[in-house]
Image: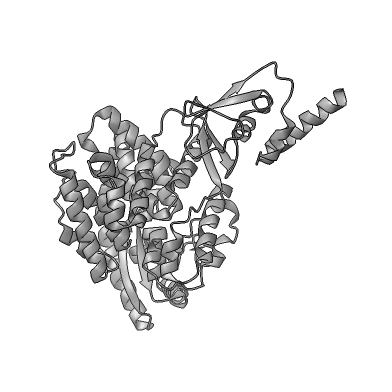
Amino acid sequence: MKQEKITIDEVIKAFKNPPTHEGEKLVRNAFEFARKAHGDQKRASGMPYIHHPIATAKILATIGMDARTVAAGLLHDVPEDTPETLSTISKKFGPDIAQMIEGITKLGRIKLRGSKEEHKLENWRRMFLAMGADIRTVIIKLADRLHNMQTLEHLRPDKQLRIANETMEIYVPIANRLGIGEIRGELADLSFMYLQLENYQKTKHISEEKLKEKELYVDKAIKELSKALKEEGVHAVDLHGRAKNIHSLFNKLQKHDMDINRVFDLIAMRVIVDDVAACYETLGIVHKKYRPMIGRIKDYISLPKPNGYQSIHTTVFGPDGRVLEVQIRTQKMHDEAEFGIAAHWLYETRKTTGWKSYFLPKKDEIDRKEIEWVKQLKEWQEDLGNNPEEFMEGLKVDFLKNHIFAFTPLGDIIELPEGASVVDFAYAIHTDVGHTATGARVDGKMSSLDSVVKNGQIIEIIKDRNRPSPNADWLTFVKTSHAKSAIRRAVKKIKEDI
Ligand code: MN
């Protein structure tokens, strides 16, 4: 991948939402500070280190983040890699930016090792989000990872594999959950290339061969359709073709015995119109012009996907009777599909349409966990109302405030509610571990059983097999119902035995 030098002016120009004068000044100051702090540090590629935070900042500006988040992107590696400290950043740029950077530094320490069992991966993703605390931190971390993936070729092969695997298992699903299609697709393709080079190349080859002829064909469809829309008086904001990314094409090809002719949406044609009514009007015009394929109309406007995705998809017999998928959406739906949660920075006054209908069940596509996740996120967004200032403030709120994640010495992750104690942790491992617990080492230090568990701690429970029973006093501080009922049962049994 070629690396271009990006200037701070280009970052300013890249803002999807142009910053205020103040905002621009903040970004430029952050840049100067980061440049001085990183000094003549170099990346593995030999490029000056500052290139990395600038590239991260540009990604953030492009997906619609505000000046403060972009400034935090510029400063994100300063405390970890330079002599400048977090408290200097806090003094110079305010506690808000400093807190975001602190979160990024914490997230940087989480590394995916070992196990690939799905429930463990799921715990990792949840811990990642919980430790991100501020959703902006998670978005900066995604942009940071995207640039690291773009420049991964400069690292040792074993590191490439570890990072690509971690990206595919943790970062891609998180980008997907946050609905940031733009970043998700690129992260998935880059990881796929490092993890399965042969399949990547094969798929890319198939795609490119087919794309050439498809592109000409889509161009023809665009001309025909824009004419038809104009005749019917529907204003199209944009019509364009979009090729499927390599990784999702590979997944699809696998379902169809690697037969590209059975993949109908290699390139989809997108029609962007002004409002929801125009979407349905456009659907009618498309079907009048091209015969629809039965059973291939998907209305994700009235029944959005769990991650909030909205559009109407239809597969038609297009020009020359060949199969073509057409996606119809408004500009807002389009931005939300590309930038996900980040799109909310773009829409100061969010309309009430859409959000509430996101959770209508769609039988075959429901993944309970996904729904729960997105639901939490959206509810939390709704609570914040329409005030953008308030919305920004609210992003500091830990949207998973009630979840704490700690490790066993073997690296298993135990999820607990906020305020849970070491005893809750012990019972979460196993009832017997709870019953026989006498103490704990928390991050290597001896701690009492009523200590409150904090995110990221490694906890070793000290057991005494001869211990007669759990202590009834534990009931005064345990938080989980599992621990409570196990203790009550054991205590009652002892009383009966006496
Ligand atoms: Mn970084």
Q: Residue at x 18, y 39 (%)?
A: 43
Q: Is residue 327 visible?
A: no
Horizontal and vertical percent position of residue 251: 41, 43
In this rendering, the count of numbered labels is: 0
Horizontal and vertical percent position of residue 447: 55, 29
Q: Residue at x 78, y 32 (%)?
A: 489
Q: Quadrant of the N terminus?
A: top left
Image position of 347 (left or right of 71): right
The answer to whether 101 is drawn above or below residue 447 in the figure is: below
Q: How is the image coloured?
A: one colour
The answer to whether 284 is drawn above or below residue 187 in the figure is: below
Q: Quadrant of the C terminus?
A: top right
- Residue 163 occupies quadrant: top left
Horizontal and vertical percent position of residue 47: 14, 42
Looking at this view, is 329 or 25 the one in front? 25
The answer to whether 356 is drawn above or below residue 456 in the figure is: below
Q: Residue at x 74, y 36 (%)?
A: 485
Looking at this view, is 210 or 164 the one in front? 164
